[in-house]
Amino acid sequence: MLHRDTVVSDIAVHRPKVMAGIFVAAFVLFTLMGLKDTIFGALMAPVIGDPAEAGLFGNAATGLVLAILLTVNIVLIAFLPLRYQIGIVWLQLLVLFLTFFYSFDLKLSFIQTKIWFMITQGLFTTLYISAISIALASGLAIIGAVAKLSSNGFAFAIASFYTSFFRGIPLLMQIYLIYLGMPQLGFVIDAVPAGILALTLCYGAYMTEIFRAGIQSIDKGQWEASRSLGFGFGLTMRRIILPQSMPLIIPPTGNQFIAMLKDSSLVSVIGVWELMFLARTLGNKDFRHMEMLITAAMIYWMLTVCLELIQSRIERHYKSPQH
Amino acid sequence: MGIRHTFLSATLVVAGALSGTAAFAGEALDQIMSSNTLKVATDPNWAPQSFLNDQNELDGFDVDVAREIASRMGVEIEFVTPSWDVITAGNWNGRWHLSVGSMTPTTARGEVLDFPGVYYYTPASAVVHNDSPYQEIADLNGAKMAAGISTTFELYLQKDLTIDASGVPAFDYQITPGEYRSYETGAVALDDLRLGDGVRLNGVVGSLPAMLKAVENGYPIRVLGDPLFYEPLAIAIDKGDAELSAKLGALIDEMRTDGTLKALSEKWYGVDYTTALN
């Protein structure tokens, strides 16, 4: 809801002109799509005869029926309470989406043989790399935020250089630079630590800004009161400032975790066997690329849906009364 | 898989050269022997050379050759799977010792890698869609052709292919494409060709074994005529370890002479691709 006001008007889908417009647009679009040779045409066979010979009439008739169904569907949904509207539209989009994938002629038995490995090896690796990286990045972000807020020129310069550099270049490039560059300095690190290091440094830079904003949002009076009670910097930070800024910091940090989960797919380029790597590799022998890509996409999606639910719960928990 | 030499790997080569870390003479061999492990880099995106099999383990012609090399050296084998760009960029720093990855030994790669031995040769062929009217290679003049980016196949279509290994027969440029497109990999080009003749492409040039594999998996394509040329494929090691190079070179010769390579080639390709050609 953007903003509730008290102006009352007819809802759009109950205005005849709007509905007529939608109907005509749908009819033209469906007709032009030439749907007589699809499953819809097959269902229309009693009316249009053999779809292959039905020509423009077949397309138009199929288009007409679909346009009527769509229009009636929209009008009916509009009568329902908001919650049901949302649920039904979600469900319909999901069914459309699945039909879309189904039309690719995917081989489900192939997915079945591979999905367990994708979860135990791929998803597991993706999750543990992301979890370690987000934990390390949080630590880095606190240090970075304190440095950025300090009056020490060196600390500020180093921290702002760090955030500027790591926010300024693509993550993929950081992964290559770290994996291939560290050995030049004499540290030959494996692919997994290199990936974790790159994700940590990149997300640490973004989260430095989140932490900085969170700390800055605390009223100056809190600092002054704390100082006047004789608290030192560390104690003020730990006991007064951070606990109050957590409600502002944690929700965006959760978002960063969700984003990192997807960005961790980039470490597949250095040969870490995580979800994306397996998605690209497993289908190769049998030329079943689409099956594996879609399966991995679904796993990522399910995972982010779960995390988003947790995220909204955390946000509700931290929602302070004054907001 | 030809020369997949991208801008990235070129950059990496330059970066490596500037940083000036010279590779270690004899060191890699010592490392292999003292750790009793041969680490082999392979990119499992190239069936039937290297891929994940039904048990989700590495398998394929290259993988078998690597296993054979390790067992003849009397050491354990361990595989790592960095991307092809990273492998061809050199400067491996001992992360892995050997690439058995069907690599074409080119001059540019020779600047960062050593090639101890050529272990087989693959024929390159043109394929077209089943429904197309083309009957012989000459029919493809003026057609819409494609290949993987910066592969030997692309260089062939651009008439700019130099292979500087011995034992490779001379070849002519038999196709003058009307329009040329390059793809990230040959597999993507095949996905476009399967849409139909002329929908996006008329033909693709690639390695014959990979093309036959695609046909086997139901791609509606057919191989046109005889192979266009043969490309030598070599094992590669990081630049500068002459002892390791000599040892591996001798092993490859031994495996060719005693028929091991031939047997492996017949196992994976059904044909002997490992010796001289005609």
Image (cartoon, coloured by chain):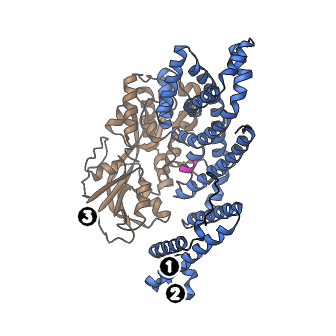
Label pair 1/2, CB-CB below 8 angstroms: yes
Which element is circle 2 on?
helix
Tell me the SS state at disc 1: helix
Membership of A284 in magenta stretch:
yes
**Is residue B209 something one can see in this rendering?**
no
Does B194 appear above or below B67? below
Mark 1, residue position? A36
Pinpoint the chain carrying mark 2: A
Determine if residue B12 is in view. Answer: yes
Residue range (magenta): A278-288
| Mark 1 / mark 2, whichever is N-terminal | 1
Query: In the drawing, does residue B59 fall left or right of residue A236?
Result: left
- Measured Cα–Cα span from mark 2 to mark 3: 47 Å
As drawn, the label of residue A48 is 2
Q: Is residue A21 above or below residue B25?
A: below
Q: Residue furthest top?
A: A230
Who's brown, chain-wise?
Answer: B
| Visual hue assigned to chain A | blue
Image point 68% across, 15% down: which residue?
Answer: A233
Which amino acid type is shown beneath numbered disc 2?
Ile
Magenta stretch, main secondary structure class: loop
Q: Is residue A82 magenta?
A: no
Which element is circle 3 on? helix
